[in-house]
Amino acid sequence: MNDNSTKSNPIKHWAEDDRPREKMQQKGYAALSDAELLAILIQSGTKEKSAVDLAREVLQLGNQNLSFLGKLSLKDFQTIKGIGLARAIAIAAALEIGRRRQLSESMEQKIITSSKQAADIFMPLMNDLHHEKFAVLCLGRNNKLLHVEFVSSGGVTGTVVDPKIIFKTALQYLSSNLIIAHNHPSGNLNPSNADKAITEKIKEGARLLDMTLMDHVIIADNKHFSFADNGLL
């Protein structure tokens, strides 16, 4: 006796209203679930699974969280049967586009007046990293955003930043004010003693160069900690 219960129902056999591409055309982007959007990227299924089935497995791999999904590697995606290198690249590229769009929208603010605005710029750069990186925002006298740049990269538990590199970048862009940031891959937002020490060192160096260190922001799991907001500057 043939058991067809495990066979997939290919998208081409679905009602037109339920097919992801047709659904997007007729009802708009917002009408589609995350799985349906991923299915469009995946394009086609296998003999056993539809593209939407594969997309659901991809989401399960990311704990149903698109932010966590962005931290996965190409090899991680390829652990799913039916997701080869080409499909893994398509998924990773789409997630990167989303990250860059978020960064672009944040940088359009141009005038930075709060730790939240600074964190909105740093988060797309740092949220998905598995190792610590240190970055600096260069600002003009009116807190206009001039430049953002990574100045250091380290391991899972820490990174060593050279203040001279920070000030070289700041002087290059004629900065008046600075905001520095780094990420904690562990998810712990609390600043370490080393974090506090480097903050004081950069604060003093900035003062000697007639600049102001406005804040040091720590990024972890879509949250941020502000030295300025917590009275540590």
Image (spheres, rainbow, N blue to C red):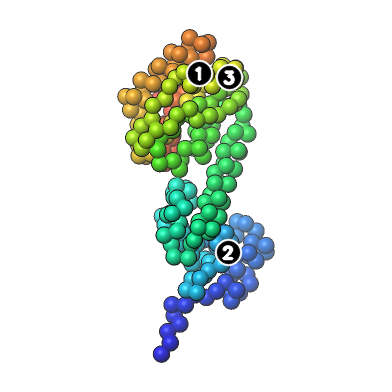
Which residue is identified by label 1? Answer: 167
Task: Say few, some or many: other residues with alpha carbon within 10 Å of mark 3 (under 14 / 14 to 19 / 20 or more).
Answer: few
Kindly identify the residue that appears in the image at 60 percent across and 33 percent down.
107
What secondary structure is found at the residue carrying circle 1?
Answer: helix
Badge 3 amino acid: Gln
Task: Say few, some or many: other residues with alpha carbon within 10 Å of mark 2 (under 14 / 14 to 19 / 20 or more).
Answer: some
Residue 183 image offset from top left, x and y in percent: 42, 34
Instruction: Locate residue 146 relative to residue 150 in the image: left or right.
Output: right
- Single out the residue that lies furthest toward the bottom: 1
Kindly identify the residue that appears in the image at 59 percent across and 43 percent down.
101
Instruction: Locate residue 212 relative to residue 79 in the image: left or right.
Output: right
Residue 200 image offset from top left, x and y in percent: 39, 17
Image quadrant where residue 187 sits: top left
- Single out the residue that lies furthest toward the right: 26
Task: Say few, some or many: other residues with alpha carbon within 10 Å of mark 1 (under 14 / 14 to 19 / 20 or more).
Answer: many
Residue 83 image offset from top left, x and y in percent: 48, 62
Which residue is identified by label 3? Answer: 172
Badge 2 amino acid: Gln
Which residue is identified by label 2? Answer: 43
Instruction: Locate residue 146 relative to residue 186 in the image: left or right.
Output: right
* Inter-mark Cα distance, 1 to 3: 8 Å
Task: Report whether residue 120 is seen.
Answer: yes
Of the pair 118 and 41, the residue shown nearer to us: 41
Q: Where's the N terminus, which quadrant?
A: bottom left
What secondary structure is found at the residue carrying circle 3?
Answer: helix
Of the pair 156 and 230, the residue shown nearer to us: 156
Kindly identify the residue that appears in the image at 44 percent across and 65 percent down.
81
